[in-house]
Image: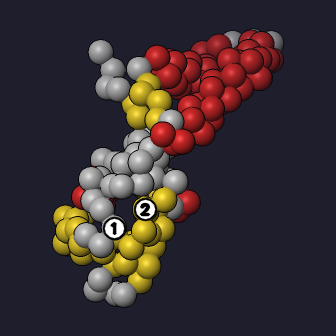
Amino acid sequence: MSKQAILTKEGFKLLEEELEILKTTRRKEIAERIKEALSFGDLSENSEYDEAKNEQALAETRILEIESTIKNAKLIDEDEVSTDCVYVGCKVNVLKIDSNTEYEYKIVGSNEADPAQGKISDESPVGSALIGGREGNTIFAKTPGGEQNYKIIKISK
């Protein structure tokens, strides 16, 4: 059985959109490439055919992954998320103590994590350390770069 994915409504919608594109547009594009490659003849030395078949396998694998994720998803209703403590769906402003730098993170499930966009997974070192924390708490996260200390400044939706 697949692991239950925690998703926000936004993350769920993005997966549904990606699945739709893969099942319609992408499948058609790949089928056309395969058809075109077959017209070149001899498949034993047809790199276009091999490449198209590899793309097809990757697309079908991704379709299965997304379908499994959607099927096993636990949807977080961000409107119902409390801001009493940090949980998936919250935005949290923290102060990194050693550098006196403030960051804003949105805590999301691992399928939605995008650190460059400020979305960190509840399973990441910092995300898991923040879960359950309250405004004013100092948390300690063991990261690959060493222990990091953060003070929770604000929790919001």
Q: Amino acid at mark 2?
A: Ile
Q: Amino acid at mark 1?
A: Glu
Rendered view: 26 above or below 150: above
Whether residue 152 sits left or right of residue 62 in the image: it is: left
Q: Residue at x 60, y 15 (%)?
A: 44
Q: Residue at x 41, y 20 (%)?
A: 72
Label 2 Cα crowd, 10 Å radius (few <14 / some 14-19 / many 20+) = many
The residue that disc 1 covers is 135
How many numbered marks have been drawn onto this rendered protein structure? 2
**21 or 81, nearer to the observer:** 81
Q: Residue at x 45, y 52 (%)?
A: 90
**Gap between marks 1 and 2 measured at Cα:** 7 Å
Q: Quadrant of residue 74?
A: top left
Looking at marks 1 and 2 on the same chain, the residue that comes earlier in the sequence is marked by 1
Residue 124, visible in the rendered structure: no
The N terminus - image quarter: top left
Whether residue 79 sits left or right of residue 30 in the image: it is: left
CB of mark 1 within 8 Å of CB of mark 2? yes
Whether residue 65 sits left or right of residue 21 in the image: it is: left
The residue that disc 2 covers is 155
Rendered view: 12 above or below 23: below
